[in-house]
C-alpha cells in the first residue's frame, strides 16, 4: 500500500492545511515510509502472543484512607501575601 500525492492533498484539504509543493512531496514520502514500517510489522509471527493494552504489567495499587490532622489556620496562612479573619484574601474577579 502506498499514499499518493493526491491523497496527501485531499487530507491537507480536509485538515484545512495549506501545503506547498515541497511539503506535499515530503509528506508523501514520510507517510509511505511509515506505511513501509507497518508492513514490516505485519511480517512478524504473532500467533502465540496474547493481546495487551500496555507493554508493562500494570495494576492499581490501593491503600486505605488514613485521617491525618491538617495544618492549623495560622500555619497555612503564615506565608500568605494577604489574609483576613483566618482566610486568604484575593483580588475580586468579575
Image (tube, helix red, strand yellow):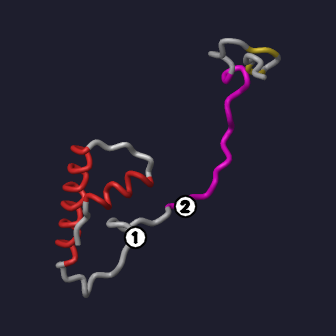
Q: Which label lies toward us, 1 or 2?
A: 1
Judged left or right of residue 23, residue 58 is right
The residue beneath circle 1 is: 53
Counting from the top left corner in percent of width and height, residue 64 is at 61, 58
Residue 20 vertical placement versus 52 (above, below) = above
Where's the C terminus, which quadrant? top right
Residue 9 vertical placement versus 21 (above, below) = below
Q: CA distance from mark 1 to mark 2?
A: 21 Å
Counting from the top left corner in percent of width and height, residue 82 is at 71, 12
Identify the residue shown where x is 25% and y is 64%.
3
Q: Which comes sooner in the sequence, label 1 or label 2?
A: 1
Judged left or right of residue 62, residue 42 is left
Counting from the top left corner in percent of width and height, residue 88 is at 73, 20
Badge 1 density bin: few <14, some 14–19, many ≥20, Cα 10 Å: few
Q: Which residues are magenta?
A: 61-76
Residue 69 is covered by the magenta coloring: yes
Identify the residue shown where x is 66% and y is 12%.
81
Where's the N terminus, which quadrant? bottom left
**Which numbered dot is residue 62?**
2
Amino acid at each position: 500500500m502506498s499514499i499518493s500525492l493526491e491523497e496527501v492533498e485531499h487530507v491537507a484539504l480536509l485538515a484545512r492545511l495549506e501545503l506547498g509543493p515541497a511539503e506535499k512531496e515530503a509528506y508523501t514520502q514520510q507517510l509511505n515510509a511509515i506505511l513501509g514500517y507497518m508492513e514490516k510489522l505485519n511480517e512478524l509471527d504473532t500467533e502465540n502472543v496474547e493481546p495487551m493494552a500496555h507493554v508493562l504489567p500494570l495494576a492499581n495499587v490501593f491503600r486505605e484512607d488514613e485521617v491525618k490532622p491538617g495544618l492549623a489556620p495560622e500555619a497555612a496562612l503564615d506565608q500568605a501575601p494577604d489574609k483576613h479573619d483566618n482566610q486568604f484574601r484575593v483580588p475580586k474577579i468579575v
